[in-house]
Structure formats: C-alpha cells, structure tokens
Image (tube, rainbow, N blue to C red):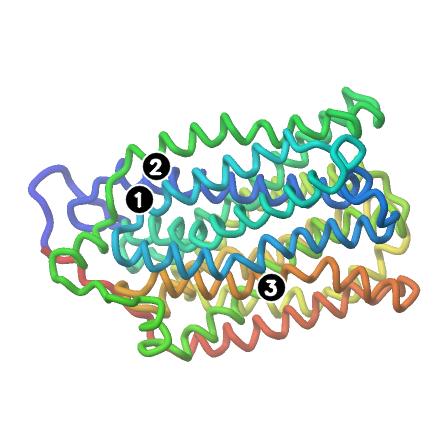
C-alpha cells in the first residue's frame, strides 16, 4: 500500500485519508444512525400509549396497543425491499448518494407523522396514513444502516474496522436517549390531556431540523476509498444483490443470525417494556423513560470500549460474549423485575442493556468482515433488514405470549433467551471464518 506525501496518515486511517477526514465521516455516519434510532424510538414510545386511542379507537384498548405494535412491524416488513433497492444502488452508484436519499426519506416521513389527523378528526385516514409513513420509513431504513457502517469502515484501516464499525452503533443509544428525553420533558411540562390532544406531535416535528443537520453532514463528505477503487478497477457487479448469494451464501445466513439479538433486544426492552412495565408491573411511564435514559447514557461509554475490544479479540467474539451474557441473565432479570422497585428497574435496564450492547457494538464489524466490497452494501443491508423484519414482531409476539400465559414473569425471558441463542450460534460460526479485507492501494 502506498501513502501520499502530505499530510501524515495515522495508523487508524487508510493511505491518503487524514485523521480529520476519518472523524468527519464517522460523525456523518453516526448522525444518520442516531436519526434512524430517534425516529424508531419516538414511534415505539408513541405506539405503546397513543397510537391506539388516537388512530385505532374502535379496536379497543388491547386491540389498539396490538395494532400499534403491528404498525412497527409494518415498517420492517417492507424493509428488505428497501435493502434490495438501496443496496443495489449503493454497490452500483456509490455509498454517499444513497445515504443522502435514505436520510431524506426517513426525516420527511417521520416529520409528517406529526401532522396526521386523529380518528376522531378524520376517521381511518390517520391510521392508514400512519401505516403508509411507516412503510416509507421502512424503505429508507433498509439502506440506512448498511450504508452508515460502510461509510465508517471503508474510510478506516481494516485492522481497526471493529472499532470504526462500532461508532455508528452509538446512534442507537443516542436516539433512544433523545426520544426518551423529549417525552420526559413533555410529561413534566404538559398535562396528560394536552399531550394526548396535541403535544405528541412535537417530537415528530423535530425530525425536520434534525434532517437538515444530517443532510449537511453527509453532503460535505466524499465517496469512500473502497468504492472509488471499485470504479477504477471496474469490479462493480451488475446485480450485486443476486451475487451476494453466489459469493457469500453462508456469510449471509451468519449475518442474519448475528443481528437478531442486537436488534431484537431493543424492541423487547424499549418497546414491549413500556406497555408491560406500566400495565403489568405498575411502573410509571416517567420511571420507564428515566431508566431507559440511564441505560442509554452508559452505552455512550460502553459501545466505543467494546469497539476497541473488538480490534483486539475480533468483532465476532465480542458478539458471542454479549449473547452468552444475555442468555445467562434473561430469566433472573425478569424475575427480579416483579418486585416493581425503581432501583431494580434501573439495574435491569443497565445490565439487560449493556450485555446485548456487546452484540450490538460488534455487529457492524462482524458483518463487514463477511463480504467482499463489490457486494457489501447489498449484503449488509439485506441481511440486517431480514433480521430486523424477524425481530420486528417481538413486541407483538411477546404481548400475545404474555396474554396467553396470564403475564407469567418468565414470558419475556423466553423471547430474550431464544434471540441470544440464535446470535451465539451465528457469532461462533463467524469467528471461525477469515475476515474479508479490502485492497485500496493506489
């Protein structure tokens, strides 16, 4: 590999890429995942309390909550379609232009939720429009995560890929914290009646200014060195999505399994727990938001640390350790939660958040190591979207399981344990494979 004459290159960057450029790119990828997470958790909190009464009134209390959770799933059902579309474009026309498209779709669709009419004002129109906007979000999300990971890792030295791949994952706790803080502020400054009447719109409308910031950051960066090399060498595949299954079919299956716990645990802990924690365990909504925020703040520290650990022992091993830890605490954690103590709730959100975070922090590096650069955008996007689709039904399925078992204390533990076991097997398989490295030498 060769290096440019000016300026010096650090051991964390590719030849010709200054540390400042690498940092700017990492921020741009992180901001996108943060906005994605913010949008997701806004709707997650919103679904547990407001979607049913506002948009699906005739379905009753249980039916309204279940429909709200299924509306979450609707955004994930179409996500693989977005992954195929944007993954193809990302491997054909470049990472940067596709990420501009996805962030634009995401921000606009989220902001528009804030102007929807309720069932009382316009009948079923608001509910139908809500599902349509969830589908648009799903399309954009299909190409967002994989592109963000590639934006960070394809500017980084392959030896530091695990660390750089972990940094966009910070977007998830940041988005969770921001969305929780917004709702905490609402509950402290507004009455429940005002929140239900119009205050719920404010968080969604904040997506518009956040979108402008994200667009500016992504517009200001250049295409990744890895994709530039693909252009120079003419190695772009004509149908990259199809070639994923020809070049790396086993890697694709491993990637899907590895992503299950990292994605699914957030759906279980942050979405289902809002309804279960208030209706069954009798915590207040504000207590749940505070506990979630505390857990998210700790992740701001642990994710970079886990990323550094991944550069030492490998991303796949970090994912496996997280899956083992989560499997061990799945049932004890939910047993302790029956005490309805706020201290136990906070402890559960910390422990039950940090252990799956190991799997979340190592996920991007694990998946990037599985695929060659010419199909990597498609592979990461489609594999992640399939895992997201499978786990999108976690809140609804856990709700149904709880209803069938009389809300037995162990019913969420079963779901968490199954997800942990799937990810553990996939991470073990990934650890046995040799990472795919890129040649970006001049």
Decide which of tag 3 and tag 1 comes sooner along the chain. 1
Real-space Cα distance between discs 3 and 2? 29 Å
Q: Is residue 143 left or right of residue 126?
A: left
Which of the pair 351/415 is nearer the observer?
415
**In this orientation, does residue 305 appear?**
no
- Quarter of the view holding residue 82: bottom left
Where 296 sits versus 90, above or below? above
Report the residue at 50% width, 45% height from top: 170
Looking at the rendered structure, which numbered label has been put on residue 218?
2
Real-space Cα distance between discs 3 and 1? 30 Å
Q: Position of residue 155 (x, y in %)?
A: 27, 49
Q: Position of residue 362 (x, y in %)?
A: 47, 60
Which quadrant is the N terminus positioned in?
A: bottom left
Residue at which label 1 appears: 97
In what element is the residue under mark 3? helix
Residue at which label 3 appears: 261
């Amino acid at each position: 590999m060769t290096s440019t004459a000016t300026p010096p290159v650090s051991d964390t960057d590719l030849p010709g890429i200054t540390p400042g450029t690498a940092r700017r790119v990492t921020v741009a990828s992180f901001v996108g995942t943060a906005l994605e997470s913010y949008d997701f958790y806004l709707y997650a909190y919103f679904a547990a309390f407001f979607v049913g009464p506002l948009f699906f009134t005739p379905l009753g209390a249980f039916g309204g909550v279940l429909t709200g959770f299924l509306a979450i799933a609707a955004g994930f059902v179409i996500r693989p379609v977005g992954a195929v579309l944007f993954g193809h474009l990302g491997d054909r026309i470049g990472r940067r232009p596709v990420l501009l498209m996805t962030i634009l779709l995401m921000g606009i669709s989220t902001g528009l939720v804030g102007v929807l009419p309720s069932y009382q004002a316009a009948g079923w129109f608001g509910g139908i429009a809500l599902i349509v906007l969830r589908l648009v979000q799903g399309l954009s999300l299909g190409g967002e995560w994989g592109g963000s990971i590639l934006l960070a890792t394809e500017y980084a030295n392959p030896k530091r890929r695990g660390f750089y791949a972990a940094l966009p994952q910070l977007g998830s706790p940041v988005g969770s914290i921001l969305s929780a803080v917004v709702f905490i502020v609402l509950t402290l400054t507004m009455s429940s009646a005002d929140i239900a009447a119009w205050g719920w719109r404010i968080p969604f409308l904040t997506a518009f200014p956040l979108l402008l910031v994200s667009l500016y950051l992504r517009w200001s960066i250049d295409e990744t060195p890895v994709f530039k090399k693909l252009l120079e060498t003419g190695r772009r595949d004509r149908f990259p999505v199809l070639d994923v299954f020809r070049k790396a079919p086993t890697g694709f299956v491993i990637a899907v399994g590895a992503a299950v716990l990292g994605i699914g645990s957030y759906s279980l802990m942050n979405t289902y727990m809002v309804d279960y924690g208030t209706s069954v365990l009798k915590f207040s909504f504000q207590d749940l938001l505070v506990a979630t925020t505390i857990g998210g703040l700790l992740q701001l520290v642990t994710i970079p640390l886990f990323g550094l650990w991944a550069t030492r022992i490998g991303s796949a091993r970090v994912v496996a350790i997280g899956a083992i830890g989560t499997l061990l605490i799945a049932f004890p954690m939910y047993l302790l939660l029956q005490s309805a103590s706020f201290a136990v709730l906070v402890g559960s959100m910390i422990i039950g958040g940090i252990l799956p975070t190991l799997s979340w922090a190592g996920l991007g590096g694990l998946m990037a190591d599985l695929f060659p650069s010419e199909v990597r955008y498609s592979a990461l996007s489609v594999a992640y979207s399939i895992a997201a689709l499978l786990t999108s039904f976690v809140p609804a399925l856990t709700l149904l399981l709880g209803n069938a078992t009389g809300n037995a204390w162990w019913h969420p533990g079963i779901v968490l344990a199954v997800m942990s076991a799937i990810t553990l097997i996939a991470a073990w398989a990934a650890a046995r494979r040799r990472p795919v490295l890129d040649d970006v030498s001049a």
